[in-house]
Image (cartoon, rainbow, N blue to C red):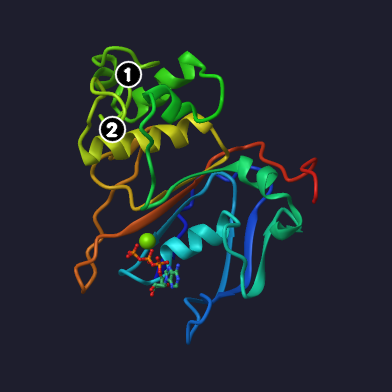
Amino acid sequence: MQIKVPANEAVSGATIRFENVCFRYPNAQQDTLKNINITINPGETLLIVGENGAGKSTFAKLLCGLYKPTQGRILFGETDITAYAPQDYMRHFAAVFQDYTLFAMSISENICAMHQPMPERLRDALVKVNMFDKVAATENVESTSLYRIFDENGVEFSGGEMQRLAIARAIYKDTPVLILDEPTAACPYIKGVRVVDVYRGEEGCAINVRIFFSCADLTAKGMPLK
Ligand SMILES: Nc1ncnc2c1ncn2[C@@H]1O[C@H](COP(=O)(O)OP(=O)(O)OP(=O)(O)O)[C@@H](O)[C@H]1O
Ligand SMILES: [Mg+2]
C-alpha cells in the first residue's frame, strides 16, 4: 500500500496524525495495518493506492474513528481521537465507503440526511457531481422517491449515478475532511479536483482511496471531550 501526499498549499489548522498505528481484525492471525505513521495537514489531499485487501478502507475507517487502533494512536490536533465523543468527531468527516447505501426516500432526504434541506446547498452538491440536470428532470426532488420499492413512480438511476448521489450527500455535509473510498469513473471531478486516476501496478490494480483535508480554519480547539 502506498500513501502519497502531494505538496499542496500549506494552511494552518489542526493536523491528523497516525502514530505507530497497528490494526488487527478480531480473530485475525496478523495485523491488517502495521506501524502506520503519517501526518495529514489541512489543505492536503491524501491518495492511498494499493491492491485489493491492502488495507485502504481499514485506514479510512480508523481515520473516521469507526475502528480503534489495536496499537498506537491517532491524534487530532494534540488529542487522541478516542477522547472525543463520536458525534463531535464525525462532524469533521464525510465519507463515501465502498458499501454506501442510498434509501428508498426522496432524493432530497437522501442527500440532506436528517437535516432541514437547504435548497442552494443541495443544488450546489448536485451540480458538483454533475447530477443536477438529471435530478431536475424527475418530477419533484422533494417528494419523488429513489427506487420503486415503496413508490411506483419512484426513479431508478444507474450504478454510477447512484454513486454520484452518494458523493453529493458527502459534499452536502460540507465537512473539513472528505473521504472517497474508491470513487469510480462515475465522478471524475469534484470541487474542481480530479478524483479518479487510474493507477496500474504490476498486478493491474486501479484502486484508490482519496482523502481531501480541505478546511483552512479547522481546529480541534473547542471540540468537547467525552
Ligand atoms: N470486517 C472485517 N473483518 C475481518 N477482516 C476484515 C474485515 N474487513 C476487512 N478485513 C480484512 O482486512 C484486509 C484489508 O481490507 P480492506 O477492506 O481495508 O482492504 P482494501 O485495501 O480497502 O481492499 P479493496 O481494494 O478490495 O477495497 C483484507 O485482507 C480483509 O480480508
Ligand atoms: Mg476498500
Residue at (37% x, 38% y) in the render: 102
| Residue 113, image x, y percentages | 50, 30
Question: Label 1 crowding class (10 Å Cα cut-off): few <14, some 14-19, many 20+?
Answer: many
Name the quadrant of the N terminus.
bottom left
Type of the residue with mark 2 = Ile
Is 60 situated left or right of 85 in this image? left
| Residue 172, image x, y percentages | 48, 29
Image position of 169 with respect to 51: above or below: above
Nearest the camera: 226 or 14?
226
Residue at (56% x, 37% y) in the render: 175
Task: Give the image quadrant in which the ligand numbered 1 is located.
Answer: bottom left
Residue at (62% x, 66% y) in the render: 68
Per the rendering, the mark at residue 63 is none
Secondary structure at badge 1 equals loop
Instruction: Read off the residue under disc 2.
Output: 149
Image position of 92 with respect to 56: above or below: above
Instruction: Read off the residue under disc 1.
Output: 144
Secondary structure at badge 2 equals loop
Residue 202 figure quarter: bottom left
Image position of 158 with respect to 45: above or below: above
Q: How many marks?
A: 2
Nearest the camera: 178 or 24?
24
Image position of 50 with respect to 161: above or below: below
Type of the residue with mark 1 = Thr
